[in-house]
Amino acid sequence: MTQAPIKNMTLPPFFSAADMDIAAFDALCSQTVILDDYPYAAGVEQNIVIYDGDNIREALNDTASEAVLKAELTCCLRDGPGVLAIKRAYADTDVIDRMTLAFNEIIAHEKASGQGRGDHFGSNERIWNSMQKTCLHAPDTFIDYYGNPIMALVCQAWLGPHYQITAQVNNVKPGSRAQSVHRDYHLGFQSQETVAQFPAHAQMMSQYLTLQGAIAHVDMPLEAGPTLLLPFSHQFPAGYMAYTQPEFIAYFDAHKSQIPLNKGDAVFFSPALFHGAGTNQAPYDRMVNLVQVSSAFGRTMETINNIAMIEAVYPILLQRIEEGTVSERDVANTIAAVGDGYSFPTNLDSDPPVGGNAPETGQQLMRRALESKWTVEQLREALVAYAQRREA
C-alpha cells in the first residue's frame, strides 16, 4: 500500500519530549490517499476514503467479495488514512428518524427527571449509554438500527469477532464551539500525566482496542460542524502525548479535513486519529450518535446491562424470525449488539467451561433460546442462572 508509514520507528521504552517530533508528524500526515488502493471505494475527499452504502450491501451478498472488502477496510483504518466515510450507510432513513424520535423522548424524560447533565464539552444534550437506553425504550427500532450490516462489517474489520458496542448521543446546539483536537478511548480519556506512565508499546496497542464511529441523524453541511479529522495522524507513535502540545494543535488546525454528511451517513475512524467536533454554525441542532466499539480484549467505556437488553429484544426478534421478516445476518448482528460475546471474566468455580475452553457467552445463550423458541419466561430463568454463575 502506498499509504504505509514513512519509516519504521524503533519504539523507546517510554515516550518523552524528544519523541514529539513535528517534522516526523508532518511527514506522516503529508501522505496522499491513492484511490486505486481501495477498489471498493467510490472516491476520496480530503484524504478521506468514501464508500457508497449500496455498493457495500451488494458486496455482502457474496462471501468472497465480503472477505476482500473487509480486508480493504482494515488496511484503510490501519495502514491508510485511518478514516472512512460511508454514504447511505442506512439505505432507509426512516429507521434514523424513528431512532431520533427515541433519542428525543429519552432526552425529554431525563431533563424532566433532572438527569440531563449535558455533555463533556459544552451545554449540549447528551445521552450517555444511548445504546442500552434505546434498546429498552424502543426495542423494535433498536433491531432495525443496530442490525445494520455495514456497521457490523466495519466492526469486524477493525476488531474481529466478539466486539461490544456502546454509544452516546450528542445533540449539539447552534453556536456551540468546536472541540479541542484529541484522541479517544482508552488513553485519549486519560490525563497526560497518566498517559506518560504507559510504556510506548502499550500506547501503540491502545488504538487497536476501539473503533470510533459517528452516525448522522440530520443533514450536516460544513456549517453544521461535522467532525474535523486529520488523516494519517493515527500513525504517529507518540500521538497520545503529542495532541495536547501547542505545535501539534496548530498543525491540526492548519491541515484538518472536514466533509459534509447527510442523514444516514456514517464515519468510522481509528481512536488514535487526531479529531474533534466542529463548530455548529447552522440554525438547527446537529444530532449524532457516537458509536464506540470495543475489542473483546478490552474494556468498554460504559457498563451495559446485557441481560435487560436481551429480554427487551428477544420476543420481537423471535416473532420476526417466525414471520420470516428478518434475515439471518440481521439476527446475528442484533445478537452481537445486545449480548456479551466474551466468556471472561467469570467465576470458573460456578461457571466452568463445558465442551471447550470457555463458558457459554450471553450471545450463545440468546442464539440457543431463539433456535429452541423458548418462551420469555424460559429465557428469563436462563439469564438469571447465567448471571448467578458469573458472579464472584
Image: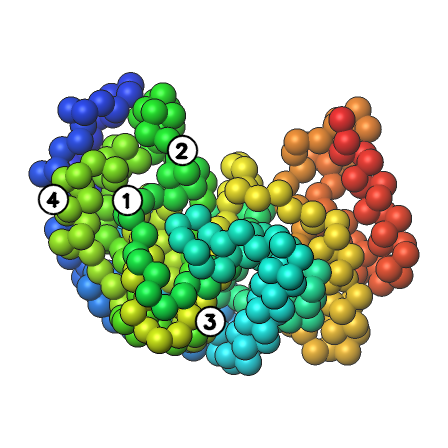
Residue at 37 percent across and 31 percent down: it is: 191
Task: Write down the residue under mark 3.
Answer: 217
Task: Say if 75 sits above or below 202 in the image.
Answer: below
Give how far apart the Cα atoms at labels 4 and 2 are. Answer: 27 Å
Assign a secondary structure to mark 1: helix
For this rendering, which residue is in front, 39 or 227? 227
Question: Which residue in the protein does label 2 denote?
Answer: 190
- Between 19 and 170, the one lying in front of the other is 170
Mark 3 or mark 2: which comes first in sequence? 2
What amino acid type is highlighted by mark number 3? His
**Nearer the camera: disc 1 or disc 2:** 2
- Quick one: SS at disc 2? loop
Q: CA distance from mark 4 to mark 1?
A: 13 Å
Identify which residue is drawn at 80% across, 66% down.
315
Q: In the displayed structure, would residue 99 be above or below residue 252?
A: below
Separation of marks 4 and 3 at Cα, in angstroms:
35 Å
Residues marked 1 and 3 touching at CB (< 8 Å): no
Q: Is residue 173 above or below residue 307?
A: below
First in sequence: mark 4 or mark 2? 4
Q: Amino acid at mark 4?
A: Ala
The amino acid pointed to by label 1 is His
Residue at (20% x, 44% y) in the render: 249
Sequence-wise, the earlier of marks 1 and 3 is 3
Quadrant in the picture for residue 177: bottom left
CB within 8 Å, label 4 to label 1: no
| Tag 4 secondary structure | helix
Q: Using the rendered image of the protein, determine whether residue 327 is visible from the camera's viewpoint.
A: yes
